[in-house]
Amino acid sequence: MIKVGIVGGTGYTGVELLRLLATHPDVELTAITSRKEDGLPVADMYPSLRGHVKLAFSSPDKANLEQCDVVFFATPHGVAMAQAPALLAAGVKVIDLAADFRLKDQAKFEQWYKIPHTAPELIEQAVYGLPELNREDIRQATLIANPGCYPTTMQLGFYPLLKAGLVNAGSLIADCKSGVSGAGRKAEIGILFSESSDSFKAYGVAGHRHLPETTAQLQRFTDDKVALTFTPHLVPMIRGMHSTLYAQLNKDIGNEELQALFEEQYKDEAFVDVMPFGSHPETRSTRGSNVLRLALHRPEGGNTVIVLVVQDNLVKGASGQAVQCMNLMFGLKETAGLQHIALMP
C-alpha cells in the first residue's frame, strides 16, 4: 500500500483528494495536515467522509510526512516550495496542486505570483503533470507540478491541431468559464452566494496566471510562436468548467479528417472523450468524474475550428489529475481509484 500524506486537507481540492483516495485500492491515508484544525476528526468537518476516513487533522510538525511514500500539497502557492526540499531529500515523492513548479522561468513565476521562489533548484526537476501529453516523464518523476484547471482544457483542446501543424499558432483564442469552487474554500465577497448567484462575469482579462503556464506548454508542440488570448469567466455554479477554443486553419482539411485527428490522438485515453463532430458537451456530464469531454465545430465550413471542452474543475482540473499522476509514478494502473461515473442530474 502507498502511504499518502495530504498537506492542506481542509480546502476543496484537499477534500476531493480525500474522496478519491479513501476508496483507492492501493492507498493508505496516513496524514492530513491543518494547523487550524489540529486534532479535529476529518469526518467532523466533512460528514460525507464518515465511515471512509478515520484520520484527524494534525499540525505539520506532528504529521511525520517523511514517513509517507507521497505527499500531495493542496495548499496556496508558496507552501510546497518551502516543504518539498526536505521531503524529497527523505525519499518522499511530491505532487503540488498549486503553481510553485509549473513555470520553468523563475522570474516569470515571481512576476505573476508576486512571491519569491524559495526552491529554484527544484524548478527544472519538476515534471508537468498532464498525463495525456507527458506520461513517460511522469512515470519517472519524484516532483510533479499539477496543471492548472484552465490550462488542462486549453492544452488538450489545442494539442492535436498544433501537433499536426493545421492552425495558426499566433492567433489562438480561449473563452473559458469556471464554477465558483475554482476560487477555493474561503470567505471572499466576490464568491459569496448572494454575490455570484444570478450573475456572470469575466475576470483577469488583462492577464491571468494561467496564461503564461498554458503558453509555455503549448509552445512545446509547435515551432511557430504561440500567441494566446485567454479570457476566464466566473459562472454561478459550484463545479464545472467549459472552454470554447478558437483556432484558424492554415491548411485545407475536411471535417471528417479533423474528427479523425482527435479520435486517433485520444483513442487510448481513458479520461478524454471525443464526442461526435458537432456535439455540445455539458459540464454536468463530467461532474464528479475525472473525464474531460470535447467536441469539434467548424461554423459554415470556414477556416475557424472551434473546440468545446468540459471537465470538473476539481477532478480532472485538479485532484483527479493529481491521483492520475500518482498512479503513474508508482507503476499502478492509471485509472485506479478514478473510474467514477459523472453525477446526473
Image (spheres, rainbow, N blue to C red):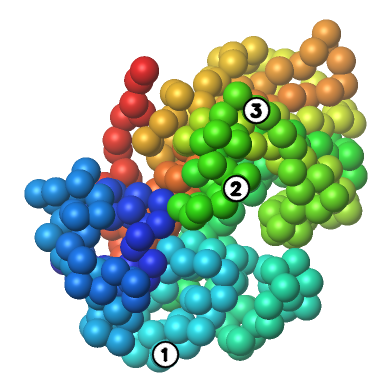
The residue pinned by badge 2 equals: 189
Dot 2 or dot 3: first in sequence order is: 2
- Closer-to-camera residue (269/112): 112
Q: Tags 1 and 3 in contact by the CB under 8 Å rule?
A: no
Q: Residue visible at 52% across and 21% down?
A: 282
Q: Residue visible at 25% across and 54% down?
A: 45
Which disc is residue 199 wearing? 3
- The kind of secondary structure element at disc 3 is loop
Dot 1 or dot 3: first in sequence order is: 1
Is residue 57 in view from this perspective?
Answer: yes
Question: Residue 93 location, x and y as percent?
Answer: 38, 76
Query: Would residue 105 appear left or right of 54 to someone viewing this image?
Result: right
User: How busy is the neighbourhood of tag 3: few (under 14 within 10 Å), some, or many (20 plus)?
Assistant: few
Query: Would residue 261 appear left or right of 273 to someone viewing this image?
Result: right
Q: Residue furthest top?
A: 300
State how far apart marks 2 and 3 are (Cα).
14 Å
The residue pinned by badge 1 equals: 86
